[in-house]
Image: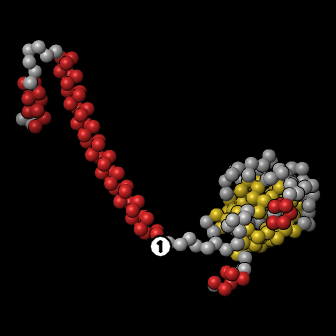
Amino acid sequence: MTTQSIARIRSLQDIDANTTVESFLVSQRDKLVNEMETMTGSLVEELQESCDKAKANLRTEFASATPAKTEPFNIKLEVVSGPHTGTKFDLCVDVDEACYVGRSTGKKFRTNGISLPKDSEVSTTHAKFEIQRGQVVIIDVGSTNGTTLDNVELLEHVAAPVTPASQTLLFGSSAIRIHSLAPLRTKDNVQAA
């Protein structure tokens, strides 16, 4: 006889003549529920302990880590078709300062961005260049007519990497060629190198 069979027989021996099948099944269900709660509770406690240990290990491991300093990037661009053909832009993309592209003539577009006021197909705020994980990316910020990079349409609010091999961006009817993309050598990061 197996252990389970013996346990069943003992359970049956506990039944008296007045016990109904329904009450017997309810008592067996209650026993199973109690056993499951006990086992689940101990598993949860073990998992919680494991998570706490893992968190502590991560905190210890990364406590001394310092984030890498990301250098700003310089991007040189030129409008090659559209109402602004021939216009050149020299942008400085930094970790804490995105460069915006749009039809707006606001300060952030004029001073370190791309302002395309004559292109009615460009949204007021169309896209932005920023640095993510040490790399320059372009993000369409929800423009009406979309943005393409090397003939591939970008998804809204999804970063697409811009590399030195990238060729052309299209905002509205303005095609913009990327002439260069390189880390900007500032006085501070030249001395640190």
The mark total stands at 1
Residue in view at x 85 percent, y 61 percent: 107
* Quadrant showing the N terminus: top left
> Residue 102: horizontal and vertical position, in percent?
83, 55
* Image vertical order of residue 103 relative to residue 15, above or below: below
Q: Quadrant of residue 166?
A: bottom right
Residue beneath disc 1:
64
> Residue 81: horizontal and vertical position, in percent?
89, 60
Horizontal side, residue 183 vs residue 77: left or right: left
Residue in view at x 72 percent, y 80 percent: 186
* Quadrant showing the C terminus: bottom right
Q: Secondary structure at mark 1?
A: loop
Residue in view at x 27 percent, y 37 percent: 37
In-front residue for pair 40/74? 40
In-front residue for pair 113/79? 113
Horizontal side, residue 90 vs residue 54: left or right: right
Q: Quadrant of residue 23?
A: top left
Horizontal side, residue 192 vs residue 64: left or right: right
Q: Is residue 64 visible?
A: yes
Q: Quadrant of residue 117?
A: bottom right
What's the amino acid at mark 1? Ser
Q: Is residue 136 visible?
A: no
In-front residue for pair 30/5? 30
* Image vertical order of residue 54 relative to residue 12, above or below: below
In-front residue for pair 54/178? 54
Residue in view at x 26 percent, y 32 percent: 33
> Residue 127: horizontal and vertical position, in percent?
76, 55
Q: How crowded is the residue under tag 1: few (<14 C-alpha within 10 Å), some, or many (20+)?
A: few
How is colour applied across the structure in the image?
secondary structure
Horizontal side, residue 32 vs residue 89: left or right: left
